Image: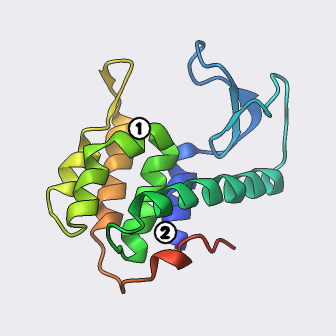
Amino acid sequence: MISEAIELIKKMEGLRLKAYKPVPTEKYYTIGYGHYGADVAKDMVIDEDTAERMLMEDLKVFAYNVNKALQSYTTVNEYQFGALVSFCFNVGVGNFLKSTLLKKVRKDPNDPTIADEFNKWVYAGGKKLMGLVQRRQLEATLYFKKAQIIDAGHHCNLK
């Protein structure tokens, strides 16, 4: 996956070396660059190298899911793929798979109205969040950056 997408995710997630719950009602804790799940304990503390490794492992999962969602539908360029992985990482695989954004990408990955679909995902708990507005703008900008088309089977190569 391209470095621009990884840097976008790191910037927007931020680095937290101690486990936390962004929202008290969350089922699990979060740590590192947005790593969330049952493997994160309440008092867990990690270092930056561990956070980096966790992110790369998480991105493999999200890249796989984006790749699978696009297979047999369309081919996207590396920037489009990176933007979709960032989006999926943030909203979750289930939401990504149900999104109109994905439907539009499958139909025509160069449809300019895809930018509008990114911008619909700026709410949390019914409130518009400026952090999500900024993230969606960055994802849409990355999505529409010009690049060579790459084969769908090669998207999961993360360093």
State the image quarter where residue 14 is shown.
top right
Q: Amino acid at mark 2?
A: Glu
Callouts 1 and 2 close, C-beta under 8 Å = no
Q: How many marks?
A: 2
Q: Quadrant of residue 79?
A: bottom left
Picture disc at residue 4 = 2
Q: Position of residue 12 (x, y in %)?
A: 50, 47
Rendered location of residue 100, percent (x, y): 25, 45
Horizontal side of 49 relative to 121 (left or right) equals: right
Q: Residue at x 38, y 39 (%)?
A: 132
Give the residue at x 46% y 38%.
Answer: 94
Residue at 34 percent of width and 35 percent of height: 130
Q: Secondary structure at mark 1?
A: helix
Q: Residue at x 35, y 56 (%)?
A: 138
Q: Earlier in the sequence, mark 1 or mark 2?
A: 2
Q: Quadrant of the C terminus?
A: bottom right
Q: Nearer the viewer, residue 4 or 75?
A: 75
Is 6 drawn above or below residue 23 in the view shown?
below
- Label 2 CA crowd tier, 10 Å (few <14, some 14–19, many 20+): some
Q: Amino acid at mark 1?
A: Asn
Q: Is residue 7 left or right of residue 51?
A: left
Compared with 64, 100 (above or below) is: above
Residue 71: give its label. none
Residue under circle 1?
95
Considering every residue shown, the one lying at the far bottom of the view is 148
Q: Is residue 92 visible?
A: no
